Image (spheres, rainbow, N blue to C red):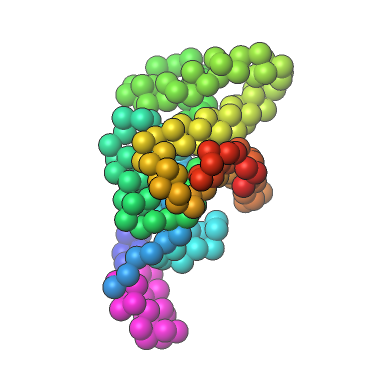
Amino acid sequence: MLSDLLEHNVRWAKGKVREDPDYFHRLSALQRPEYLWIGCSDSRVPANVITGLEPGEVFVHRNVANLVHRGDLNLLSVLEFAVETLEVKHIIVCGHYGCGGVRAAMDGHRHGIIDHWLQPIRDIADSHDRELAGSDDADTRLNRLCELSIAAQVEGLSRTPIIQSAWKQGRRLAIHGWVYGLNDGLIRDLECGCAGGHGHRESS
Ligand code: CO
C-alpha cells in the first residue's frame, strides 16, 4: 500500500537521525558525489542499492536501455552539471543483461514512440551483424548486444563536447562501461572505459 511507503520513510529518517543526529543537516548543506551513474530505468537495477552508495554519493540519470542520445537535453544537462559543477571523477554507464529495451528494439514489433528512442540499438546490432549472427541462442545474442550497446554509449559520451572540454582542461575524469546481471546481482566491468588527459583508452 502507498501509505506503507510513507511510514517506511518516517522510520528511515528517524533511524538515520538516531545513528547520526547531524546527518540531514550535513547532507542538505552539500552535495559532492564522485560518481555519475547512467543506467537503465528498469526497477531491478537501482544504482544506490546495488553499489552500496549512500544518499549524496552518486548522481543518477536513468532512461530506457541506458542510452546516450546526443540531442537528449535531459542527459546533457545532467552530464554538464555533474562534470562542470559537481566535478565527478567517474562516469559509469551501467546496462544490464536481459534488458527489456534491448529486447524491444530487436523483436520486430511496433511499440510506439519507444521505437524511435531505441533506434541506436538497432544501428549497433547492424554494425555487429556478423558477430551477433554467430550465436544460435536468442538470449545470448541479446545479452551480447547489451554489452555492445554499453560500449557504444561510453564511446558516444567520450565524444561529447562536455567531456572533450573537461579532458582538454586536464581534468581527471574516467568513463566506465559496466553490465549488471539480473540473475546473480553482480556487476561486471566490460573494460571498454576511457579516461582523459591524453585521450588514451585504459582498462577501467
Ligand atoms: Co533495461
- Where on the picture, by quarter, is residue 87? bottom left
Report the span colored magenta. Answer: 8-28
The picture places residue 122, in percent across and down from the top left corner, at 49, 19
Residue 108, given in percent of the width and then of the height, sits at 48, 15
Residue 14 part of the magenta segment: yes
Residue ID at (60%, 39%) = 201
Residue 47 lies in magenta, yes or no? no
Q: Is residue 38 visible?
A: no
User: Residue 125: percent from the left, percent from the top?
Assistant: 55, 19
Q: Is residue 33 above or below residue 15?
A: above
- The answer to whether one can see residue 108 in this image is yes
Q: Residue at x 35, y 83 (%)?
A: 22
Looking at the picture, does residue 190 appear above or below residue 143?
below
Whether residue 71 sits left or right of residue 183 in the image: it is: left
Percent across and percent down for residue 95 are 53, 40
Residue drawn at x 45%, y 51% is: 171
In the rendered view of the protein, which quadrant contains the N terminus? bottom left
Picture quarter containing residue 96?
Answer: top right
Q: Magenta-highlighted stretch: main secondary structure? A: helix
| Residue situated in front as seen by the camera: 132 or 83 | 83
In this picture, is 122 found above or below 188? above
Q: Tell me which residue sits at (66%, 13%) in the image.
A: 130
